[in-house]
Amino acid sequence: MSAQTNTVTKILALIREDRLPAGAHLTAQKIADRLRLSRSPVNDALGVLEQRGVVSRKPNRGYFLEQDHATLADDGEDAAPPSVDDIVTHAYFRLADELLRGELPMQCSEALLRARYALTAAQTQALLGRIAQEGWGQRRPGYGWEFSSMMTTPDSLLQSYRLRLALEPAALLEPGYRIDRQVLARCRAAERHLLDGGIATDTADQLHERGVRFHESLVEASGNPFFIDAIKRVNRVRRLLSYRSMQDRSRYRQHCDQHLAILDLLERERNAEAAEALASHLRSTLDNLARISGLLAS
């Protein structure tokens, strides 16, 4: 049994021992004290339980039990370890958060990252490969890795939105612009999923990908490879700070409404109005990000 799976099993045992009801607050520090562990492995184990639907995490409040203790009695010992993708994704967001907080050096070795996030060599390579592909980290000549300081400041995210404000509305005005009806339907379905509860339940990764797919789909319909390439590049490198901004999700319902309005205009081939609506949407996002600049810098 891996150390992580062992910690999961111990937490489930505590839940049954204390006969906790659904909705009970699980405090990482209290669990760590009782198990005589640090908070890091406890938080990792709670993350595994969240993936299994045993607990849910509420922003700024922590983890809460989703199932009554009696429900866990039969299957608690069968806590399956997370998949490789889940482990790498979890490590990715921990690394991103610690880098933004200044808790991780901008230059470090693979051995340090492997030990810090309890990864295998293959998982470490997958993690660094993803970061390199997104453009905010690269291998140093000779030894170690270096992360981009450009993407650890709030101004970087605002600058990326100003670039998008200059390019994306212009793409909608390209001669021969045509967006397929199936693309429109797919984009609408994604927005309705968010409005039906996905804003609260989707992971930061899922929220980022849905936003990226929406905007890239609109630009791809221009057929202009220069617009398409530029937007895809900026989307790859803005993920790090975009993740931090997602800790405030109050603006997402407004975003969905704006996205749906843009799709309606494009379907009616009112591209000039759609371009202005898209510009207004990006400007409002810029204003919102400026208001939470303290969160981005924290």
Image: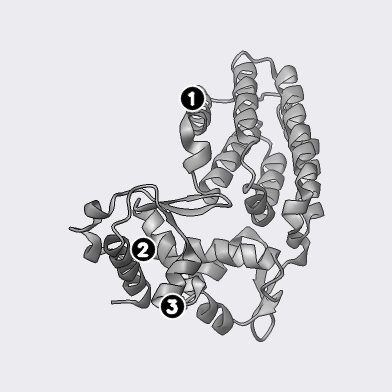
Which mark is in front, 3 or 2?
A: 2
Residue placed most toward the observer, 56 or 112: 56
Type of the residue with mark 2: Pro
Please, is residue 264 above or below residue 164 in the view?
above
Which residue corresponds to the image point at 63% horizontal and 62% vertical from the top-left? 97
Q: Identify residue for label 1.
A: 185
Alpha-carbon span between mark 3 and mark 2: 14 Å
Q: Indicate left or right for 72 with 114 as reference.
A: left
**How far across and down, in percent of the image, does residue 111 sit?**
55, 84
Q: Based on the displayed image, in which of its 4 quarters is residue 272 positioned?
A: top right
Residue at point 39% right, 61% down? Answer: 48
Residue drawn 61% across the image and 24% down it:
257
Residue carrying label 3: 120
**Mark sitting earlier along the chain (2/1):** 2
Q: Which of the 4 image quarters holds residue 83?
A: bottom left
Left or right? Give the position of 192 relative to 269.
Answer: left
Q: Residue furthest left?
A: 74
Q: Nearer the viewer, mark 1 or mark 3?
A: 3
Q: On the rendered image, what quadrant is the C terminus found in?
A: bottom right
Q: Position of residue 95 (x, y in %)?
A: 59, 67
Query: Three-letter amino acid code at disc 1?
Result: Ala
Query: Which residue is at the front of the view, 19 or 221?
Result: 19
188 versus 27 height, above or below? above
Which numbered disc flags the more N-terminal residue, 3 or 2?
Answer: 2
Element assignment for label 2: loop
The picture places residue 225, in percent across and down from the top left corner, at 67, 41
Residue highlighted by disc 2: 82
Visible residue check, residue 221: no
Quote the CA–CA distance across marks 2 and 1.
33 Å
Residue 65 shows up from this direction: yes
